[in-house]
């Protein structure tokens, strides 16, 4: 015969207290005398009682779940963000619920509105222009934004993209490169910051920048743009890519076309994804500490949910990781 599952009434009867007392003890909404708490704990363990999360959320108004929206879970950068966020969530007793908007702004609102009804707060990556994000504030859920918001008033976590781009361009300048190209992704807010960092370093040396816009922040898009960059009238000898995936796709296509990296062109990316270190040649990249970003955003959101003060903007420092895809010009 199947053993029956212990209920809150069973615990109350065995402990000699009311069901309301057991409920308040389990949900941590009221403290009792040490003797009463010890008796209830002992009975819960003896009976194997497990509280119903749905019922608990109805009592406390809390789900103990946090939502995280990412732009493309197949991009290792976002997988690392999720890993960092999930570690902090688990440490604080929260469950992480994930949605992937698949680089489609039209899907964001529908997905996030549905997610908001199941969580205590949300961490949001978005491609939607800020002036169109009023609906996000209207969801009436604590939220943390990835990036540097100009219009919406939400706590945020951002990487220092402009400084990272400036550092990697200074590195290329020190190697003697003279002709520069940038493969960007203009649909991203971070694209403007990265391009600004490249231009800042080049302007100081009186050098120009040739800009190419990828249709997506993917390896396939980087591969697709390669011939236009390398077979044009003035091919660059250094290329800065919006992210590592674009850079890896470009390098693959360049080798097919008969070009050598870094002998013919030095290539750099952003995000320092793990695959970059296994490429041939290994990819020089700007490490934005993706896992750290996810952890910082989760800590900020949990502080907000629990009524504690959280700083408006947390900036994660960028770090240049030098590998074999860049080399000094002869």
Image: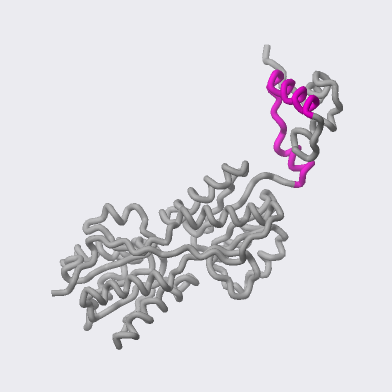
Where residue 127 sits in the image (x, y, percent)?
Answer: 53, 67
Q: Is residue 325 above or below residue 58?
A: below
Tell whether 321 sits left or right of 87.
Answer: left
Residue at 78% from the left image edge and 40% from the top image edge: 29
Q: Can residue 251 be seen in this view?
A: yes
Q: Is the magenta stretch mostly helix, strand or loop?
A: helix
Residue at 16% from the left image edge and 68% from the top image edge: 263
The colour mode here is: one colour
Where residue 227 sits in the image (x, y, percent)?
Answer: 25, 72
Where residue 175 sits in the image (x, y, percent)?
Answer: 22, 73
Q: Which of 176 and 208 is in front in this view?
A: 176
Q: In this view, does 74 lie above or below 240?
A: above
Q: Is residue 257 visible?
A: no
Q: Which residues make up the magenta segment? A: 34-61
The residue furthest right is 18
Q: Is residue 59 magenta?
A: yes
Residue at 70% from the left image edge and 18% from the top image edge: 46
Quadrant of the frame with the C terminus = bottom left
Where residue 306 sits in the image (x, y, percent)?
Answer: 69, 51
Q: Which of 157 and 264 is in front in this view?
A: 157
Quadrant of the frame with the N terminus = top right
The residue furthest front is 34
How many numbered circles are shown? 0
Q: In this view, does 141 lie above or below 240?
A: above
Q: Is residue 46 magenta?
A: yes
Q: Nearer the viewer, residue 235 or 324?
A: 324
Tell whether 121 sits left or right of 289.
Answer: right
């Amino acid at each position: 015969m199947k053993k029956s599952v212990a209920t809150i009434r069973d615990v109350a009867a065995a402990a000699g207290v009311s069901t309301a007392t057991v409920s308040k003890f389990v949900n941590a909404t009221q403290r009792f005398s040490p003797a009463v708490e010890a008796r209830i704990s002992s009975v819960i363990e003896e009976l194997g009682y497990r509280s119903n999360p749905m019922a608990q959320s109805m009592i406390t108004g809390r789900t103990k779940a946090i939502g995280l929206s990412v732009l493309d879970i197949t991009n290792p950068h976002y997988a690392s963000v999720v890993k960092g966020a999930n570690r902090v969530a688990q440490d604080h007793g929260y469950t992480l619920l994930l949605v992937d908007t698949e680089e489609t702004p039209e899907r964001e609102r529908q997905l996030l509105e549905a997610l908001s009804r199941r969580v205590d707060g949300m961490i949001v990556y978005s491609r939607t222009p800020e002036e169109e994000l009023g609906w996000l504030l209207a969801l009436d859920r604590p939220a943390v934004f990835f990036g540097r918001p100009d219009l919406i008033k939400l706590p945020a976590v951002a990487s220092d993209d402009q400084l990272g781009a400036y550092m990697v361009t200074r590195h290329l300048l020190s190697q003697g490169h003279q002709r520069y190209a940038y493969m960007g992704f203009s649909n991203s807010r971070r694209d403007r910051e990265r391009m600004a960092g490249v231009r800042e370093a080049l302007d100081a040396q009186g050098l120009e920048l040739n800009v190419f816009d990828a249709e997506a922040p993917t390896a396939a898009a980087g591969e697709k743009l390669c011939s236009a960059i390398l077979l044009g009238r003035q091919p660059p000898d250094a290329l800065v890519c919006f992210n590592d995936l674009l850079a890896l796709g470009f390098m693959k296509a360049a080798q097919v076309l008969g070009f050598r990296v870094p002998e013919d062109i030095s290539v750099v990316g952003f995000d320092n994804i793990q695959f970059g270190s296994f490429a041939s040649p290994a990819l020089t990249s700007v490490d934005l500490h993706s896992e750290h970003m996810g952890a910082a955003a989760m800590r900020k959101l949990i502080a907000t949910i629990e009524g504690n003060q959280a700083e408006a903007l947390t900036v994660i420092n960028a770090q240049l990781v030098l590998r074999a895809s860049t080399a000094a010009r002869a």
